[in-house]
Amino acid sequence: MTENKARYRTEIQQMMFVSGETGDVSPETTSIIENIVQQQVMEMLKRATELASRRGVRTISTDDLIFLIRNDKAKVSRLRTFLSWKDVRKSAKDSDEKGGGGGDAGGVDDFDLTANDPTLGNGPAVGTRTNKNKKAKVGLPWDVASFYSEQVPERDDEEDEEEEEMNAATLQRLKQADERTKGMNAEEYLHFSECRQASFTFRKGKRFREWAGFGVVTDSKPNDDIVDILGFLTYEIVTLLTEEALKVKADEDALKRESGRDEEKRGSKRRHEPGLFDPPEETRSPVGPKHIQEAFRRLQRPDLKSRYMHHVPKGNWQRPLKLI
Amino acid sequence: MSSTPSRSLVNGYHRGSNGLIASAPRGASMTRESAIGSSLGGTGSGGDDEDREEDPIHLALKQRWETTQANIAALFSDVRPTLQSQKVPGTTPETITDTRAETNAKTSAPFKKAARTIDDDYGDDDDDDEEDETDKESPLKSKGKQPHVNGISPLTGRSPAPITKPPAIRTSTTMSQDNAKPSAEDARRQLEMEKKANADAAKRSFQTMFYTLENDRDAMLEQQKLDELDREVENEISGDAEGNQSNQQNASGTGGTQGSLGSADLGASSLTLKHLIARIDAKRDMVQASDNQLRTLISEVRKGRSKWASEEKVGQEELYEAAEKVLMELKAMTEYAQPFLQRVAKRDAPDYYQIIKQPMDIGTMIKKLKQLSYKSKKDFVDDLNLIWSNCLKYNTLPELPIRKKALYMRKETDKLTPLIPEIVVRDRAEVEADERRQQSLDADDDSDDDDAPIMASRGHKAPKKGSKGAPSSARQALPTNVEDASTPASEVKPALPLSTSALRNEFLRADSETNETASAGLSTPPPGSGTPLVNGVSSVSIAGGQTDPMDVDGTGQSTMIATAEDADEDDAEFKTWKQVTKKDRATIAADRNRLFRGNQLNPDEPALLRDKAMMRRWIRLQKVDLTDKSASTDDVKDGAEGTEVATGETLAEGIEEQHDSTLPDYYHTMSAIPALDDCWKWATDSEGFVVPQSDKWMRMYPKNQYKSAEGVLTKRIESNMRQMQDTRKICSKIGIVKQMQIQGQTYSNQFQKYDPEPFLEKDIGPVVVSEDGPLMTPWVNRAAMQRAVGKIFYHAGFEDFQPSALDTVTDIANEYFTKLVQGLKAFQEQPKIDAQTSRFTYEEQVLHSLDENGTDIEALESYVKDDVERLSTKLTVMHERMKSHLGDLLRPALGDHVGADGAGAFNDGSDQFVGGDFAEEMGEDFFGFRELGLADELGLEALSVPFHLLQNRMHNAYQAQHQGPVSDNGIVFPQPAPYDPITIEMLPRQIGIIQDFFRAKLRTNHENPLVEDEDLPQKQRFPKPRLPPTGKISSPRKRPIREQQQLAKKKRKLEESEEKSKLSKPIGPLRLEMPDRMQSGVDPEKDGEGNASMMSPESITGH
């Protein structure tokens, strides 16, 4: 798997940068992250295939994938938004050539937070948005709408409060990004927005398919949507890992300061006081593999629900990988 | 007989007064007897001796007369020494009446004696019933007079007593005897009290001690032996009862009729029961019982008279009563008395009768007692002692247990013998003779009072001394004693005439009150009543001497007894208990034992029944236990009786009197059952119907336990479900509309009407449970669980689901809840920190067990928030959306402004008018919208034709057949008469040019009337010819769709078959006649393959 390590190094670095790791991340770290992401993706594909085969279908559908993350409602919400925007973009592309590469336009509109798709940053033009906005809502099999035999069009005046709530999480993330970009100059911001577009899948479908084990784990001809969803999810994974690792590192640093205060007191007392000439942030040591590992461990920690029925005798039973 | 001398004596002595008195009572007592007496003895009283001697009646009368004479003489003789002056006015009429009263009082005052006197008489006579009457009357009269007489002349009042008593008695009264008399009574009383105390102690010990039943078997066996003995004795007695009876009667010297009950010596009973007795006598041959039995019966009926009472035997009753009591007492000490109950069998001790010449045992004694063989206390006591001495004589080895028993029994005997009065049974005749003699003696020398008693007593003293002098030969003493008693018995009392006393009057009065006391007073009691035994033995008195042991000297014996008792008395309390309760225990044990045959229960044996009295006793004791445990037994008893009287116990209303048992409660196992509550009683009302004890007494399982609890969440969920149902209803309507838009033809039965039943949770029926707690019926509980799961399913959006899914989820839920509760229990049962505080509070317990099972409050809360509340809003939104969508689908023109009849739609001159929307006028209910409920839903009463129908999709062919409800609208035009169908008959009326055409058509139609094209079903209809703009018909006319298909398919087929098939097709009318109401109610989805076993919550709720 050595060759795998190199595959998404840049993307991972970019994603980590967007997620808050400003430092130069070592290849070991990225390779660890890449492995983790790959494992997660393969696991997802495997489970989705199982679900599909349970329905009697060979190829997995988007619903299968979404079903896997159904418990993370915020993520589902983001994914749905993403998918709906993807639809919009596609139709816009179809109707006229104006939309072009959504990715190109996306970065520019970043300040329009409310209207923009935050995750990929490639929102279409304002004009297109207005009439196609609601169309793209992706129905899920466990939605209320599926209770009924008839599908009825949504009404414009309805506001899905659930969606609103989920948007809140998204907004929080956008706000963070906004804070970070506030102090940036144009160049830096350009770099930032480029980094935001980093994707495992975008325009590298073949590489991704090989990397994720399509054809081995599951059907070799995946749906376009599935690849997009996976791309979205991998981005989410990396973000999550990075954020967690940063937290781990912050904890570690705090601990170090606590314990190592006495030693460093004499030499570097001044350093703790923020000053005008403090070294820039980059000089901080980036997250290392151990932080990533710790973050992964924390994320894998079984939640309460997994204890449900764990009294049932089941032999030597390994806890399944937790999708993050 | 001594009658002759006494009579002559009286006659000779008191002639004057005699004549005076003799006439007086006869005149006064105006009875038949006296009449007879006067008629018979009117002359005889003058002194006709020869006649009387022959006639028994005369004899009796004479005797009676003489007795009276003697009595009167005694009276006067008595009066004379004390009141000499009164003798002179005694001849005055007043004294005559007085004396007459006296005379009667004489027979009555010593009441029993008088009765005996009478007995004597009717023993001779057949018709002495009448005589009884008079005699009964006279005592009554005299009784009434007695106080009066006493009041006038107290001294004369006292005087009758001496008449009955020989003067000897009077003389025998001394100061010491006066003291001795009460002391004897005291002794008896003391003994009684001792016994009572023992019983009480035993009873008390129930409270502190639990006695096992191990001794009951012995007790039972012993008791059985006793009973056997009794039976034996009874058999023997009754065997010669007749003979005995007659013997007795013969012995009394009268040749009375045998078998006549009246002649049996019933004592005073004959007075009170004389009618009964006369009756029985009259029917004597019909009564099965022997005289003996009858006598026993009657004497038992009578109060205060024992079966031993006898008229001709003076003192018999008292003696035998006491003797029997003593004997029974001794017999009851089965522990010790057992070996002495029966005669020693020869096979048990072959040499016994060589050593013991005079065997004796208790059984024999009872026999003798019943045969009235004992004449005096001495006889009886001698026999008793004979038993013990025999035993001691035969069993010489000192360590033999039987010796111990004998010694114990002797000790007991000594204790008890003082209870027996010192009486020698004598014949009445003798007594009377004595009296007379005494009288004459009195008459002879008034002043010489002392002599006569001494003389009289001499005869008594001699045998007694003799018996004392030869104590070793007690066996011989028995018969001789009897003889002694009979032969020298010239006195009623074997008194010790020690000295004359000035106090004799007082004593005599006491004497006259009751013979018993008199006799007791006369007997020489053991001086110290507290220590009767030893003192009695060592006392110098004659009585003490009588009880002296034969073989052993007094002191030695007493010491031996003491040691023997000590050896035995390891547990005094237990022993007491054993003795006191022996009989009861034996009875109960025997009762129980009867239930067994061999070692098995005997099913034929009647069951032991509980007994109301015992139950009441038990309840009482329970109550006492409850109320006052510390109260002493006496108090308890009193109090208990008090309460018992006060509170009519439920069980024991008006039952037989309480027989007190000495046994503790647990001996009466059957009775130890608490009283029933009112509710359990079998009660009937006045008409005899059973009053049903209302259900409230039954422990019903509380209602609504099998329904979901009323709560916010439940209500929310249920409202969600209702919302879903409503929305589904709209959905089905939308589906119908959409279907109609697509389909060319629609039929009213094509669409499934969605009419869901409301959710109803059924409770279980009334169930009676025996205890609180959950109902342990797995299937019911499982069904309830399934219902809950089904509800959740439905709430999650599944309209129906497979049973296997339901089962699986039910199992999982079951498992989960089991774990949850187990966890809760485990946390609850954690060892406590200290006595009060448990380790976990309730909240902690719940939280811990929830956590253990992978959930927490937040998860539950989020479920409620997301999956219930938010779902509710979502459902509402969806419902609104569906409704508006349906509204969109339906004709927007038919809004509210249309009005009830749709006429409003024309107001704006709108499309309907132009488009020819006259469906209303046609009165149709297209597609059964009304039936589907769409019209009501949407306020579309006037809805008749959906917009797409205006595009000529549907033909109006229905119109003729369809009898839809006609909506009343403004203007109703009469329907134009339909064209007459073309028939063969009508053919000539048509214009000529098309007649051939029609004829050909008719022929193909089998001469049936032709159908208008318009009336043809859709598929047979010819397409409307379309004229192209050119106006030329270029193509040949198309065939109807149906025909085209058939032609294509069945080209090869014959014409006939084609036509036939055409006819048999389910064409329009046929189809439309198909049931247009959805009676089946079957969901088409459910009809589908694999759906047959689908279920929905509605069906589950019916569980």
Image (tube, helix red, strand yellow):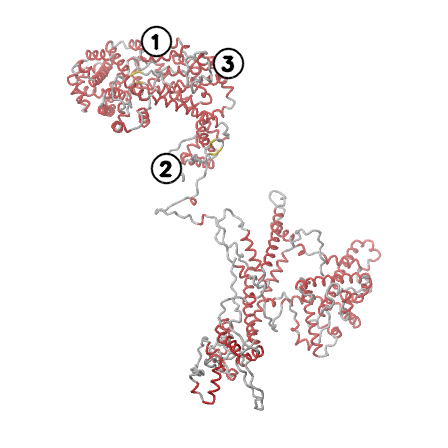
Spatial separation of the CA atoms under disc 2 and disc 1: 59 Å
Q: Which quarter of the figure is the N terminus of chain A placed in?
A: bottom right
Q: Would you name the residue on which mark 1 appears? A: B462
Which label's residue is closer to the chain start, 3 or 2? 3
Q: Residue at x 79, y 56 (%)?
A: A257
The image shows residue B192 at horizontal and vertical percentages of: 41, 23
What is the residue that sits farthest to the right in this orientation?
A: A267
Three-letter amino acid code at disc 1? Ala
Say if labels 2 and 1 share a chain. Answer: yes
Q: Quadrant of residue A8?
A: bottom right
Q: Would you name the residue on which mark 3 appears? A: B397
Three-letter amino acid code at disc 3? Leu
Say if labels 3 and 2 share a chain. Answer: yes
Q: Quadrant of residue B1024?
A: bottom right
The image shows residue B218 at horizontal and vertical percentages of: 48, 26
Mark 3: few, some, or many residues within 10 Å (few <14, many ≥20)? few
Which label's residue is closer to the chain start, 2 or 1? 1
Q: Describe residue B1022's horizontal placement relative to residue B152 as left or right.
A: right
Q: Describe residue B965's horizontal placement relative to residue B160 as left or right.
A: right
Subunit bearing disc 3: B
Subunit bearing disc 2: B
Say if labels 1 and 3 share a chain. Answer: yes
